[in-house]
Each structure stands twice: as structure tokens, then as C-alpha cells.
Amino acid sequence: MQTFLRNPHLRRFGISFLVMELVALMTGPPGSTQTPTAGFRGSFFEASSFYGLFRTQRWVVFLALAVVVFAIWSGWLTQGSVIRTTTSKALTYPRAVTQRKPVRWSLLGVALIVALLLPRIVDDAFWHSAMTEQIGVFVLLATGLNVVVGFAGLLDLGYVAFYAIGAYTTAWITGSLPTPAPFHGHFDPFVAIPVAIVIVMVAGILLGAPTLRLRGDYLAIVTLGFGEIVTIFANNLYGITGGSQGSGPIPHPVLHVGPLHYVWSLKPVPYYYLLLVFLVIFLIAFSLLEHSRIGRAWTAIREDEVAAESVGINPLKYKVMAFAIGASTAGFAGVVTASQSNNVFPSSFTLQSSINILVLVIFGGMGSIFGVVVGAIIIQVAYSYLLHTPPQGYQSADLYMYLGALLVLMMIFRPSGLIPSRRRQREMVLSKAGEGHMDEVLTGDTP
Amino acid sequence: MGAFGHYLSGHFATFRLEFWSLFVGGVANGFLYGMIAVGYTLVYGVLRLINFAHSEIFMSGGFAGYFVMKALIGNSVPSGAATVFLIIVGIVVGGTAGALVATLLERVAYRPLRRRNAPKLAYLISAIGASYFLFNLAGKEFGRYSISMPQPYINHPVFHIFGAAVQLYYVVIFIAGVVMLFALDRVVATTKLGRSIRAVAQDAETASLMGVNIDRTIALTFIVGGALGGAAGFLFGLGTGVVYTMGFVPALKAFTAAVLGGIGNLRGAMIGGLLLGVVESLSVVFVQAAYIDVIAFGILVAVLLFRPTGILGERLGRAA
Amino acid sequence: MSDLIFNVDSVTLRFGGVVSLNDVSLHQKRGEILAVIGPNGAGKTSLFNSLTGVYQPQEGSIFFTNREGKVISIIGKKAHRVASAGVARTFQASRMFSALTTFENVKIGAESHRGIGVIGAMVKGPRTRRGERHSDERTEELLKFVGLYDKANVISSSLSYGDRRRLEIARGLATDPQVLLLDEPAAGTNPAEKIQLTELIRKVRDEMGVSILLIEHDMKLVMALAERLYVLNFGSVIAEGSPEAIRSNPVVIEAYLGSSDDESEKSPS
Ligand SMILES: Nc1ncnc2c1ncn2[C@@H]1O[C@H](COP(=O)(O)OP(=O)(O)O)[C@@H](O)[C@H]1O
Ligand SMILES: [Mg+2]
């Protein structure tokens, strides 16, 4: 029996089968509190037809899929290395081409033009608001979190708290909270940008300075708790934040510089362009930062904190710096979201969103600015698409289930992400070979 | 004495009046925290990492217990003997579900990374992913509202201490908690499994040279910790009902308890759990209920910053 | 007074019950090549860690005199502060930034003690550029000095043992130190590399004026380089003096012969 179970083919088939049935469950209809087994019944025993070609029960369909997966898996085991070398050989030339500077710049130029024309290309009300609220804002948030997680190697699970503080600062400055605005003024959201960035940066430093000396896993929990606390306060301080009712209406920004005059409104596209402008600024700044002294210091700390200290780098200073930069990016995103959506609710700043942003960073590739942008766009487009045309049985909260599974899969199969940063990829490979001291930063096992 | 003095003295009067009933409730919560906290500590001992998905082990125990209670009780009113039986069944089923989920977790989210000698950051992310996957899957399947569990007993006061009524629910938790935590302590201290766990906790490399099967020990550690977490999930659900997000807050608090007692230290986790439960319960007098969670978190940050090794110090190997 | 670069007085360092350093006193003159020898577990690395702010001894004092003649107390200082004050080191098990190139490794050392303006780094103004150029030049210089210039763009984890040691020396020198602490620099290197290393260390002192504090098991290398030696055993200094004096010191011979578990020790010959 034991030897029978150890049979590699059987094992592989068993795993394929279990995974596919899990997929059946994930894609099946939801259950409910009253009928908590309905989901299971519907996932496995519901009759299913494939465009009317044949009719059968769902579990049979997924059994068939399991056979397919098993076949592909077995094929990969025998042919995988051949396929891999062939594809990498085929990709050598395109890779080398994209490494060339002029090619890179023109690709970036094309991407920018596409981004500028996007509201024209996809002329649809749903997608206009999606590309602003879901894609633009989250790409910006992911870019900021990438500085913290990717560059400095700090796992921040309360990132959304800074986003919330930025949004609430906007509401405060514009006089939309129960608590009176400073100087009794009702400022324009544009005024909120510097104020929010400063406040959020200070919050980041206040949280970061004491906690960033903690081991990585402790830091993750502390930031997670910080995120929760901000939500608890936002929910309960009725006299200050408006509690769960949220803020009053927040005015839209007005731009008035010389001959330029523009009034934003509920329309999402103008906000899309506002985001795009700032996103480009942030991206340029972060990529300069990555290749500067500061970026190298972050890499040094991430790889070997003890060695970094031995050449005079103050790890805490650089970590706080990364934290504050990431936070202020989120704060800025908060300003835009607040004025665009016209009000702030505590429910928009849950732990789920923090994890969502983390997935964007991990999926794209920690530390790779380009990867994170691409990854964030892919995931947020998929999310919006599922929102727009939900498949049968899909609920919008199911997204988190898929994102969770994605995190695990990424860590198992491609830890350095879709488009890895070169340094990060090396680190992952090196730690496999027992090189480097990355873990010590996390476990605190110093020499 | 100003207004604040009156405020305080008013609260202290309530405090004196309510002390014992709050204390009893706090100890009950403390046992639950302790049962979850030992799971964190055990896994930390052998893997040197915090099992972020432990909250979902707890949640699975809650749901498993719910289904079994629903099937066995339905709309009936169980007799006294049946109550004892039902609670034992609930604990066993909750514990089994917890152990099962813990095993799956170890297999799927941790072992592949261990094979690859992945950096710790990867483990954390993988565990967070697994946690998200599990509780959102539960949300999809079982709905996203709290369900109350069919009660195996009428929750009447059993006896009084210092005028405070002790409900049957608390008595159940006390007995279950004491029995399970004591059993765990003995298992780790005296059995062969316990010796392996301690050996791996002290030095995995040496342990494996001495013939300890590391994979097996780690798997069994997850099972033991998972069983206690799952059982705690059932006991918690008995009082509060079950919902897909039920694991998050208790697990965060249990983690606080584990850190408070010194992560990696079994008895520390138990003591930390009791301490946190009581402190949190008593602080109800002074703080609005909505901010109770803030207190636990404040304790966590304070301990991490000022005494990261906790009350009893770290190390499963030495202190247990 | 100020010709003592290190003035270590009665330092005791404990880890729980383990006493790693027991009442250790040590003096190093500016410009001296000083060696610390002793069997494994004697406390040599612990001494280095105490000198660099990585460990905090419970008793005693450690003073370092910087370039300006200012006397600085090391105990209670963070490691990065000690490094910025002018104490550079290498590690027993080499610790490079393995995913970075040789050049980047050294450059991190060269630029670490410069001010860190975020805005400057983002905007890349003329000052930042000048700083970059300066670090690049310094890095090139040092790579040539240690003989790694041809491997500047190699990922540091693919370097040989000997090259890693030299890389760590270059990285340490890049911080512009007054003293360089070398923890078993010859471990894992072949005889040819050992000769090169000996020359390199002497050149560091002679051409750069950097004092050297050296832990080493290879007696040939120690005797060729060191002007004075300290011998540690079980956390205590058991002897101090010139190479000749140490070689014939019966206490030292006893200590080495007594440590049977240590095969890397050739008896001092
Ligand atoms: N971080 C530490 N924690 C506990 N004990 C330590 C630590 N560092 C060094 N020691 C102890 O100090 C003693 C001296 O070690 P070390 O300085 O590394 O010796 P050497 O470098 O001479 O071989 C050893 O017994 C070692 O176990
Ligand atoms: Mg040593």
C-alpha cells in the first residue's frame, strides 16, 4: 500500500486531481449562511454544459481537466528542460534588443502614448472609471509599496493606513469632516497634496522609527496591527472622522496657474490624466532613486545588514526613509481618491486592500519598477473585467481568494515575480545556493 | 479632584463591582488565546517563523465544529450526558479539522519553500497568501455573515466566586483548556515526539545528524499546534458563532500572547494568553468596547519594543 | 596618548553564562601591524565584534583615536557609527553583497559616509553627479590597488575565496579608515594567494597609512607581517610581545598543544 501510494505517477495524478477539484470549488457557485453546503453541491454535482456540446456534472469536467494537467505535467518532466532551453534561446535576441537603450526609451515612449490615448481607445464609461479608480490608483500604490517591500525588503501589511491618512487629510483640509478645517478654511484638494504628503510622511516616520528595528516578521505584524488601528479609529471617532458614515462631500480640485484653468468634476477621465502625470513623476523619481547611492544602500541592507553596517550604513535611517517614501506615495494616492470619489469611508481601507497591493508588487516582481507596473495593470484589469462581466458564480469578494492563491503559487514557482528585478532575482538564486545573509535580517541571527 | 478624577473614581467603582465577573471572562478568553498561542510558538520553535495562516486553522476548527453540532443537535435540546459527549465530539472534530488544515498548509505553502531554502520573506508571503485564500474560500462557501452555533447546553451559571456567576460555557473552556494545555506540556516534555521537537527547535542540523527526521517532526508539530488551534476555534465558535473572518482578531491576540510569554516558549505562551485575556477583559471598564483590540495591539508593540524576548524568554528547547 | 589607535582596557564580554572575553586589555600604536592569535573559540572574533560596535561588552573600556586625534569611546556606539569613525573590517566568513558586482560592492563602501539627500538622489543635481564621479574614481583606484580591476563587473558571489577576501579589503578601505581589522583573511586561500595577500596587507599599511589588526591562524603569514602579537585563550590574553618572543613563550606553546580539537593550528614554527 505504502509503495503503491509512493508511485510518482499516481502521486502526480492525485495532486492534479485535488488541485483541479479545488479549482472547481473556487469557480463554482457560492454557498450562503443559510445553505452552507450549496456551494459544494453546486461546484461538483451541478450539470454543466460546454456551449451545449455535451452535458455532464462539473466534477467530471474537472476530472477531465485533471487528466489534461497530469499529461502536461508529465510531459514537462520529460521535455521541460528542452522546452526551457529552446524558449530561452529563442528569447535571447529579443532580450538583448530590449536591453539596448534607444529601444528601451522608444518602448517607454510608446507605452506613454498608449496611456495618453487610452481613454479614447477604450471609450466606455465603466472602463473610464476602472482605469482611474482601479488601475491608476492601484498602480501608484503598488509603485510606492515597491519602495518599501522591493527596495528595502520590509514587509508592510498596513500600507493602506497611509492611503487612508492621505484621504482623511484631504477631507479635513477641504472642510468635509466633522472636525473643523485648519484656519477655518475650505481649501482646494490641491492644497491637500503637500499637507497630506507631509502628514503621512510624519506618520510613517513615527511608526517606522521605533518599529523598523524589529525583525521582519514582527514588523509585518506590527504594521498589520497599525492598519487595523487606523481603521478602528476611523470607524469610531464619530466627532472627528464621521465614523462609519464617512466624510461629507469633498470638493473637486481646481487648477488655476497663469492661463491654465481647469475644474475637475465627477468625470473620471480628467482624474486619470492627473494620476498619469503624477505616476510618471513618481516612476522617474523612484527609478533614479533605485540607481542612486540610496538604492544601493537599500540593496546592501537587504542582503546583509551586518556587512552594510560595517561600511558605515545606518540601516534604520535608510529603512525609515523607504518607509516614509512609500507612505507619502500612498498619501498622495489618498488625496486623489478622496477628491475623485467625493467622500471617504473607513470601509475603503481594509487589510484586504493592503494585501491586494502587496500582491501587485509580488506578482510583478519585488524591486522591479517596470515589473510592478505591468503586474499591477494585469491584475487590476483582470479584477475590473471580472467586475464588469462576472462569470457565473463569481462574487467580487472572491478576488481575494484568487489573489491569496496567486501569492502562494508565486512563492513556490516564481518568487522573484513576472518581470524580476535583476538584483532580486540573483538574491533568490543565491539564497538557494546557501549564499548571502538575507535571512538574518529577518530572523535576527546576527553573527 | 477635577472632572477627570471623578471620571476615574467612577470607573474604579465599576471596576470593583465588576472585577470578578470580568476576571472570569478574561481567564476563559485567556485559555483560548493560550491554545492558539502554543500553535504559533510550536511552529516558531521548529521553523523559526511566524505562521501567518494560523488564524485559518482556528477558523476551520470553528466551522467543522459548527457542522457537527448542527448535524448532531439540529433543533433538539440535549440532555446532560449528551452535552458532555457533544462537547468532546466538537473538540475532537474541531481539532481534527485544524490539524488537517495545518498539514495541508505545511505541505503546500511551506515545504516547497523549505526544499528550496527560500528566504524568510518568501515564507511570510506564502503564508499570508494561504491565509487569504483559505478564509476567502470559506467566505465564498459558507456565506459572509456570522452563523450562531447550535448550543449543546443551556448556558446557566454553574457556581459563583466572589458573587460573580460562572457560566457553563466558561466551565467548559476551563476544563478543556487545562486538560489540553497540560497534555501538550507533558507531550513536549516527555514523549519521543516532544524530544524531537525540542531537538529540532534547538538546532535542526544537529538534530538531523542525531537521526531525528526533520520533515516528520515539522509535520507533526503542525498537527499538534493545529489540533489545539482547531479545538480553540470550536470552543470560541460555541460562544460567539462562526464566520469566515473569525480567525483574524483572536489569532492576532494569541500571537501577542505568544510574544508576551516569549515566542518559542510553550509555558510562556500559555501564561501570556491568560495574562492578555485578563488584562483585556478588565480594561473594558476604562475603554470603550470598540477600542479593546487597540489595547492588545498596544501590548504587542510595547513588548516587541521593550522586551522582545517576552516574560519567560525565548527558546522552546530550554524552557519547556 | 594619541599615538595609540586602539586602547582597550579590561574588557569583559559575556553571553549568558559564557564568558567570551575576560578582562582583555590591548593597545595598538598608530601605523602598527598587530596580530591576535589563539585557538578556535578563544574569543578573537568576539574581540573584533566588540571593537566594531557589533557586540557591547559589559565591562571595561575601548577607546579609538581618530585622524584628528580625537579619542572616541567605542562601547555604546552602534556599528555603523564606529565604521564612520574610521574602523573598517572584514569578516571571518566573508560577507559581501553577493547579488551585486565587485564594483558595486566597493562603491557602497566609498559612498556610505556621504550625506544622504533623497531629493539630491532623485533629481541628480550637479552635486550628486560630482559625488558619484568621485566614488567611481575611488572605487576604480581601490580595485586596481587590490588587483580586482579586471573583475569589476563580475557578480561578487562568483569570485574565488582569495578574490572575496581582497574584495572585502577594498570595500573596507573604501570607507577611508584609520585602522583595518582582518578576521582570518587567509582562510581558504591557496599558497600563492597567501603570498599575494601578505604583500597586499603590507602595502595597505605602507602606502595608505592604515593600521592593521589581524586575526590569523597561518603562522607563516602572521610571523611575516605582525610587528607585535597578542595571544588569546579562553577569552583571556595569555601573552603579548614580538613574534620571536611569542614563538618561544612556553605558555603559548602549551595553549596550542592543549587544544587538540583544532587541526588548523600548525604549532608555531
Ligand atoms: N553571539 C554569541 N552568542 C553566544 N555566544 C557567543 C556569541 N559570539 C561568540 N560567542 C562565544 O564566544 C566564544 C568565543 O567565540 P569567537 O569569538 O568566535 O572565537 P574565535 O573567533 O576566537 O574562534 C565562543 O565560546 C562562542 O560560543
Ligand atoms: Mg573567529
Image (cartoon, rainbow, N blue to C red):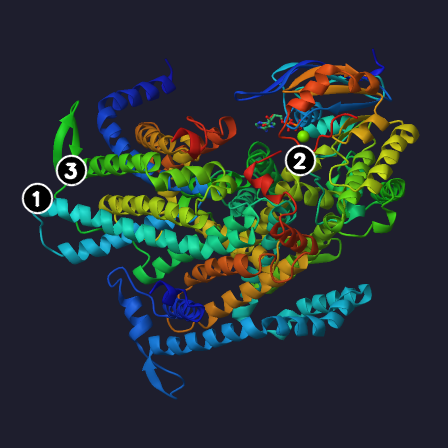
Ligand 1 shows up in the quarter that is top right
Q: Which residue has dot 3 on it?
A: B168
Where, by quadrant of the figure, is residue B5 drawn? top left
Q: Residue furthest bottom?
A: A53
Q: Chain of mark 1?
A: B
Question: Distance between the Cα atoms at labels 1 and 2?
Answer: 63 Å
Amino acid at the residue labelled 2: Val
Q: Is residue C65 visible?
A: no
Q: Which residue has dot 2 on it?
A: A306
Amino acid at the residue labelled 1: Gly
Residue under the point 71% across and 39% down? C94
Residue under the point 47% across and 54% down? B111
Q: Nearer the viewer, residue A87 or A433?
A: A433
Q: Residue furthest right?
A: C207
Q: In the visual, does A42 lie left or right of C54?
A: left
Q: Are marks 3 and 1 in contact (CB under 8 Å)?
A: no
Secondary element under disc 3, as helix, strand or loop, is helix
Residue under the point 46% across and 67% down? A387
Amino acid at the residue labelled 3: Leu
Q: Is mark 2 within 8 Å of ligand 1?
A: no
Q: Is mark 1 within 8 Å of ligand 1?
A: no
Where, by quadrant of the figure, is residue C13 drawn? top right
Q: Chain of mark 3?
A: B
Q: Chain of mark 2?
A: A
Where residue B261 appears, as percent x and y from the top left, is: 40, 30
Q: Is residue A146 above or below residue A38?
A: above
Q: Which residue has dot 1 on it?
A: B80
Between circles 1 and 2, the one closer to the viewer is 2
Where residue A267 appears, as percent x and y from the top left, is: 56, 63
Q: In the visual, does A32 lie left or right of A87?
A: left
Mark 2, Cα crowd under 10 Å, few <14 / some 14-19 / many 20+, is: many
Between circles 3 and 1, the one closer to the viewer is 1
